[in-house]
Amino acid sequence: MNLPSDDLLQPVEGGLAWITGDGPHAGVILSTRIRLARNLERYPFRETISGSQQELVMEEIVEAFESTSNDMRQFVRLADLPETDLTVLLERHLVSREMVKFREASGLLVGDGGRLALLINEEDHVRIQALTPGLQIETSWQIASRTDETLRSQLRFAYHHRFGFLTSCPTNTGTGLRASVLAHLPALVLTREIAKVLQGLAQIGLTFRGLYGEGSDVIGNYFQISNQTTLGKSEDELVDHLGQITRQVIEYEENARQVLVRDALDEIEDKVWRAYGLMTCARSLSFDEMMNLLSAVRLGVSMKLLPRIGVSTLNQLLLWTQIAHLEKRAGRKLDKREREIERASLVREMLAEEGQDTDE
């Protein structure tokens, strides 16, 4: 069967650790990300830096990491990649829209089994990113912190004794840390409790965005929850705060699922099985439709209404059915109609494969 594999993208493989579905609370939390923004002291920031200086920044960061780390890693210059490969990296959360926009001087280094990425010459000189499956805030923080220490042993970052690490965007100044989780919260949406939860997050210094962060819409009941500010608190405080609040959100979502079982089981079963039926039979699926169907199926799996499907398969569907991954699988550019047909075909194949694996 021509299903996607880990070597789908060359020359950068990996970046897929977050879709394995084997992390804690994987039924609600798809992934955890810790990101540290850093700038080299001796170079201007993004607004005034020259192209030649950006080249020097890239060389120094890569050399510093490689001189102190034995980790298996891959490095690629974004300017060397075709448009589809760049979008694949974006879909995998390995690069940002900012990097793709300024690809000429941007680079990506991936290591630690795909859990670590260095985004070089993004909005800041480097963004250290740790991305893990499920709720693993402490593990993600350890990966990012260890890498930060590795680079700081070789480089001097821009730092002010009063304000902390200096960044291109003032809201990142201080620790330079953004901690986030990608949460699936369908029961809170269905019970109409989601607005109350999101308002509560805003009151305690957290914010929410869509699947791909700032500027992206919420679709399929996926919410990216993160800290809003980095100044005035330590890294440990920010990480602990997000962990505590995320566990509360998980509890709210699980309680809402119990309410659905108690008060609306027939309706939920119908919704789940209709979604599953469409996914296994449809010959054409738009991305928005697929995401909403996938959300219902994921809810059904978590409530043990569809016990044959693994969380890892659902996470893979979330990724493989996006535009660039579909085009990599097809080996060519696809128009809108072709994408919808290819997406439906892939969904049918993966769900059929899951059923065969379970029956064996």
Image (cartoon, rainbow, N blue to C red):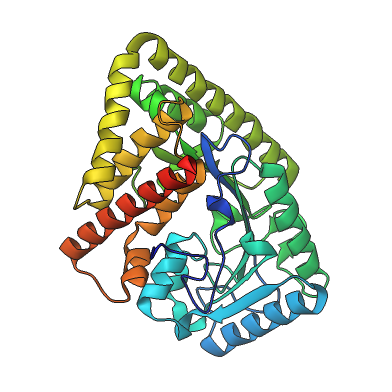
Q: Is residue 23 above or below residue 287?
A: above
In the rendered view, tell whether residue 98 sits above or below residue 188: below
Residue 44 appears left or right of 150 = left
In the image, residue 359 lies at what x, y percent? 46, 41
- Residue at (42% x, 67% y) in the render: 88
Toward which corner of the image does residue 330 lie, by quadrant? bottom left
Residue 304 in view: yes
The furthest residue to the left: 337
Q: Residue at x 36, y 69 (%)?
A: 329
Q: Is 196 in front, or is 288? A: 288
Q: How many marks?
A: 0
Residue found at the far front of this picture: 360
- Residue 214 appears in the picture as rendered: no
Left or right, 280 with reference to 59: left
Give 7 or 199, whichever is nearer the viewer: 7
Residue 196, compared with residue 30, is above or below; it is above
Q: Residue furthest top?
A: 263
Residue at image point 23% right, 62% down: 339
The image quarter in which residue 68 lies:
bottom right
On the image, the x and y values in percent for residue 349 come to 34, 54
Q: Position of residue 290 (x, y in %)?
A: 29, 46
Could you tell me residue 185's position as x and y percent?
43, 31
Looking at the rendered image, the quarter that the N terminus falls into is bottom left
The residue under the point 30% across, 40% down is 292
